[in-house]
Image (tube, helix red, strand yellow):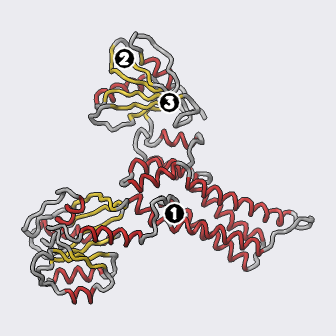
């Protein structure tokens, strides 16, 4: 394909040891030769995949001392000629070199355009391309490993094998439709059902991994909730192993929402410390309470904190009603103090919830809490070497549509519908699976996917 030449800064635009300007396209090498000179002030040919030391010049003026790496087509990230200029990290040298490259004829790359070219040129399929951003955004080692497996083609292999099996089945059905009078062995309804059931089981297994896969990819939205001064901020600090939230004995100290990511055995938790829920006349605190309720309603997991040294209050009982139908863990905190809380009432109201006694001051019960969070979400079913998890919402939706089409094809076969009716549902499943790898995806969807990438990737 003939694309124009694009460029962008591929590293963070901030102070650092090294910054990289990436150029890709048919004029990438020529542009680089125009602006680069060796230490002996000569223009040179870049060796493939080797660093070349020298200077970037704007006419007779030295812009920066650099190392240049050239990667020739088709053996590069985009399958085009690529040049990466490694300059001193910092906003000024990065922007000056970028401006010079643009002046020489390149244009600014769109977000994700380098990876989009890798996809359009056949180096990556769409699921692999999407995993590039998953690698960049990974919050834990497990989420990184899952993205790396997908970049290596683990999901693509499964999808392509299923599509190949569907192709073979459709070919057999097509023969039976097109040549009914010929002496060709016709596929039976029983054979079709058996093959469809095998395909359906594979698709549904992959789709069912989506819930856990999404947790590893996006994190579990977790909210710490309770009335003021029960130890919510202290709990967040001890889980994060840093003093992120302000802790005092004054009720209402936390007035805004504090969000952080926490890693529990490979599970990223987007944990939120909320303002204590209580009736208050303080306008600012009241806003914080309303925000707490909003986050509570959206949370995947609720950690409800109670003070064991106090009797249950109306605020406690109101929150208990809120969490009856939520996935929640109850923390009875401050067990190092004299107990006054009514445990029987808690057990009767929240009989199906996990209840853990803690003393955050002494860090008692924190290990148990982390273990229960892991077991509640994963249930001990994720093995350390398991990589066949679907984590992308778009992929999960496509798998669900494919499984529905296969289910309809199975029912149509059981009902002894004509072969061409059955073929329609099978072909739909084939196309839905193709959306994952990009074989049958619409152009608008491709554009939307890459628009969410960072600039320079």
Q: CA distance from mark 3 to mark 1?
A: 34 Å
Q: Nearer the viewer, mark 2 or mark 1?
A: 1
Q: Would residue 227 appear left or right of 206 to someone viewing this image?
A: left
Q: Would residue 300 appear left or right of 310 to someone viewing this image?
A: right
> Circle 3 is placed at which residue position?
82
Assess disc 1: are there few (<14), some (14-19) or many (≥20) residues with their C-alpha within 10 Å of its C-alpha.
Answer: many
Q: In terms of depth relative to the viewer, which is nearer, 105 or 397? A: 397
Residue at 72% over, 73% down: 193
Assess disc 2: are there few (<14), some (14-19) or many (≥20) residues with their C-alpha within 10 Å of its C-alpha.
Answer: some
> Circle 2 is placed at which residue position?
58
Q: Position of residue 125 (x, y in %)?
A: 57, 48
Residue at 26% over, 72% down: 303
**Quadrant in which the C terminus is drawn:** top left
Q: Nearer the viewer, mark 3 or mark 2?
A: 3
Q: In terms of depth relative to the viewer, which is nearer, 136 or 27? A: 136
Label 1: which secondary element: helix
Write down the quadrant of residue 64 in the picture.
top left
Outermost residue, left side: 250
Q: Indicate which disc, 2 or 1, sits on the residue closer to the N terminus.
A: 2
46 above or below 107? above
Q: CA distance from mark 3 to mark 2?
A: 21 Å
> Circle 1 is placed at which residue position?
396
Evaluate whether residue 50 shows in this view: yes
Write down the quadrant of residue 256 in the picture.
bottom left
Q: Would residue 430 appear left or right of 371 to someone viewing this image?
A: right
Label 2: which secondary element: strand
Q: In terms of depth relative to the viewer, which is nearer, 137 or 114? A: 137
90 above or below 175? above
Q: Position of residue 367 (x, y in %)?
A: 27, 67
């Amino acid at each position: 394909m003939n694309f124009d030449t694009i460029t962008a800064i591929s590293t963070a635009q901030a102070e650092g040891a090294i910054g990289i300007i990436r150029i890709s396209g048919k004029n990438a090498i020529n542009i680089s030769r125009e602006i680069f000179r060796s230490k002996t002030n000569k223009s040179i040919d870049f060796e493939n995949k080797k660093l070349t030391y020298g200077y970037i010049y704007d006419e007779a003026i030295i812009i920066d001392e650099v190392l240049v790496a050239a990667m020739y087509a088709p053996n590069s990230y985009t399958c085009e000629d690529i040049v990466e200029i490694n300059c001193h990290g910092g906003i000024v040298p990065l922007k000056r070199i970028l401006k010079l490259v643009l002046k020489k004829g390149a244009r600014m790359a769109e977000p994700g355009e380098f990876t989009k070219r890798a996809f359009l040129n056949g180096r990556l399929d769409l699921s692999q391309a999407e995993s590039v951003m998953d690698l960049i955004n990974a919050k834990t080692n497990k989420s990184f490993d899952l993205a790396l497996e997908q970049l290596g083609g683990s999901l693509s292999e499964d999808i392509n094998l299923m599509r190949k099996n569907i192709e073979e089945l459709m070919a057999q059905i097509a023969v039976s439709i097109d040549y009914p009078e010929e002496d060709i062995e016709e596929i039976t309804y029983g054979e079709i059902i058996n093959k469809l059931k095998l395909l359906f089981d594979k698709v549904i297994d992959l789709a069912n991994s989506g819930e856990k896969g999404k947790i590893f990819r996006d994190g579990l939205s977790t909210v710490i909730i309770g009335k003021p001064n029960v130890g919510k901020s202290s709990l967040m600090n001890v889980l994060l192993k840093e003093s992120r939230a302000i802790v005092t004995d004054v009720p209402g100290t936390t007035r805004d929402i504090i969000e952080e990511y926490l890693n529990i055995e490979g599970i990223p938790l987007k944990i939120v410390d909320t303002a204590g829920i209580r009736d208050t006349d303080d306008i600012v605190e009241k806003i914080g309470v309303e925000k707490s309720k909003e986050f509570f309603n959206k949370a995947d997991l609720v950690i409800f904190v109670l003070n064991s040294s106090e009797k249950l209050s109306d605020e406690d009982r109101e929150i208990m009603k809120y969490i009856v139908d939520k996935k929640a863990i109850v923390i009875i905190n401050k067990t190092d103090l004299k107990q006054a809380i009514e445990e029987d009432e808690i057990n009767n109201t929240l009989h199906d919830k996990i209840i853990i006694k803690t003393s955050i001051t002494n860090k008692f019960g924190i290990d148990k809490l982390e273990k229960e969070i892991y077991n509640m979400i994963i249930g001990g079913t994720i093995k350390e070497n398991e990589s066949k998890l679907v984590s992308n919402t778009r992929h999960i939706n496509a798998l669900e549509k494919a499984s529905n089409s296969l289910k309809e094809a199975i029912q149509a076969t059981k009902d002894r519908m004509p072969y061409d009716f059955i073929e329609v549902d099978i072909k739909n499943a084939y196309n839905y699976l193709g959306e994952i790898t990009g074989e049958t995806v619409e152009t608008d969807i491709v554009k939307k996917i890459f628009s969410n990438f960072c600039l320079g990737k």
